[in-house]
Amino acid sequence: MAKSYSVTSAGVNPAEDRAHRMRMYFVAMSLRVACVTSLFWVRGWWVLLAAAGAVFLPWFAVMVGNAVAHDGGQAPDAPEPLMLEGAAPEAPIDAPAETLLVVDVEPERRAAAPADPSADPGRPGAGDSPGGAA
């Protein structure tokens, strides 16, 4: 019997997830603006803290903005693969197969053909003039 799943095992609403990520990005970038502007009046070792916030907060904001929430709901189980059944082979595999090769014309080898048609007297049209009339 197929296993049933409840609505509570569904994932997070995409619109709510996107709104949450946008809020988190806005907060992180607002903190970055505060860090950059504070560099003008902060003195001492606090400058390092404000500079670190100005440098690392954009990376953090992008990572938080791109992180899609995944719910810990139940994932459906994969179904069992179907077995394909075919007809039994007509001939045993160990029997040698008969190969029939039919050659109905003599093969021409273009590499062995002379470049000048008048050089081969046995070839039809070898003694003809280029215009076709003798």
Image (cartoon, rainbow, N blue to C red):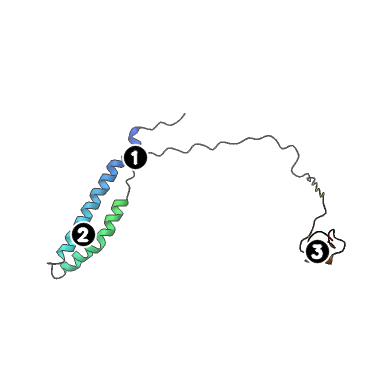
Across and down, in percent, residue 83 comes to: 59, 36
Distance (Cα) linking label 3 and label 2? 85 Å
Identify which amino acid the numbered label 1 is placed on: Gly
The circle on residue 32 is: 2
The circle on residue 117 is: 3
The circle on residue 2 is: none
User: Along the line of sight, which residue is nearer the eye, 70 or 27?
Assistant: 27
Q: Residue furthest bottom?
A: 44
Q: Residue furthest front?
A: 133
Q: Are marks 1 and 3 in contact (CB under 8 Å)?
A: no
User: Along the line of sight, which residue is nearer the eye, 40 or 123?
Assistant: 123
Distance (Cα) linking label 1 and label 3? 80 Å
Q: Residues within 10 Å of mark 3 (few under 14, many from 20)?
A: some
Q: Residues within 10 Å of mark 1 (few under 14, many from 20)?
A: few
Dividing the image into 4 quarters, which one contains the C terminus? bottom right
The circle on residue 11 is: 1
Identify which amino acid the numbered label 2 is placed on: Arg
Q: Which element is circle 3 on? A: helix
Query: Residue 113: which quarter of the image?
Result: bottom right
Across and down, in percent, residue 27 comes to: 21, 53
